[in-house]
Image (cartoon, rainbow, N blue to C red):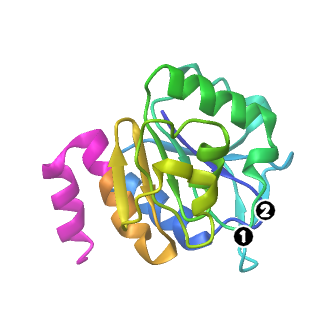
Amino acid sequence: MNYLFLDNGFEEIEAITTIDLLRRAKIAVTTVSITGTPMVLGAHNIAVEADGQIERIDFSDAEMLILPGGQTKLDACSALCELLIEHNKADKPIAAICAAPAVLGKLGILAGKQATCYPGFQEALGESYVGGLVVESKNIITAKGPGLSADFAFCIIEHIKGSDVADAVYDAAQY
């Protein structure tokens, strides 16, 4: 199972585009609220009901962890931070877009890897920051910002299911 984490203030385009395109590729993705309630309010006041809450999910089947950006406090959720660290130690894939790669940087997950992020968050990435639009490095996929949401999702699809599936979804979506 792939999990996408939501906190109040998340960038709707980054989350919803990723969820939509992954599901079109027949990739199972579960949305997870870290707010203590199933309802999560996006940065532009779009309310989303998550599939589950972090404290009620067993992540033992986790394949990829996905973090949309926005004005969130993902790094303040200790359960999520612990999950990210353990997932990385197991060399399992993690994807983050916009401001979310900063969480990975603060946790030391980007050490020895390359990454990108939204302008202004580079410091948290340290030596890992290379710029770019979408960067895949070892087990980490990062993307610069909201306008790259589809590119981010296609990179995830290609990572999970290969280029043929990514190309088929790309074509079907008329991207």
Q: For marks 1 and 2, give the CA distance.
A: 6 Å
Residue 133 lies left or right of residue 163; in this view the side is right
Residue 174 lies left or right of residue 73; in this view the side is left
Amino acid beneath label 1: Gly
Disc nearer the start of the sequence (1/2): 2
Comparing 56 with 101, the one in front is 101
Secondary element type, mark 2: loop
Q: Which residue is mark 2?
A: 8
Answer few, some or many: residues within 10 Å of disc 1's Cα (few below 14, many 20 plus, some between 14 and 19). Answer: many
Q: Residue at image x 76%, y 30%?
A: 56
Q: Residue at image x 78%, y 62%?
A: 8
Residue 166 counted in the magenta span:
yes
Residue 50 place in picture, x, y as percent: 69, 52
Answer few, some or many: residues within 10 Å of disc 2's Cα (few below 14, many 20 plus, some between 14 and 19). Answer: many
Residue 21 place in picture, x, y as percent: 38, 60
Q: Residue at image x 51%, y 74%?
A: 146
- Corner quadrant of residue 49: bottom right
Residue 35 lies left or right of residue 137; in this view the side is right
Residue 159 counted in the magenta span:
yes
Q: Residue 31: tell me if it is visible.
A: no
Start-end of magenta stretch: 157-175
As displayed, is residue 39 above or below residue 87?
Answer: below
Residue 24 place in picture, x, y as percent: 34, 57
Q: What secondary structure characterizes most of the magenta part?
A: helix
Q: Residue at image x 19%, y 44%?
A: 162
Amino acid beneath label 2: Asn
Q: Which residue is mark 1?
A: 42
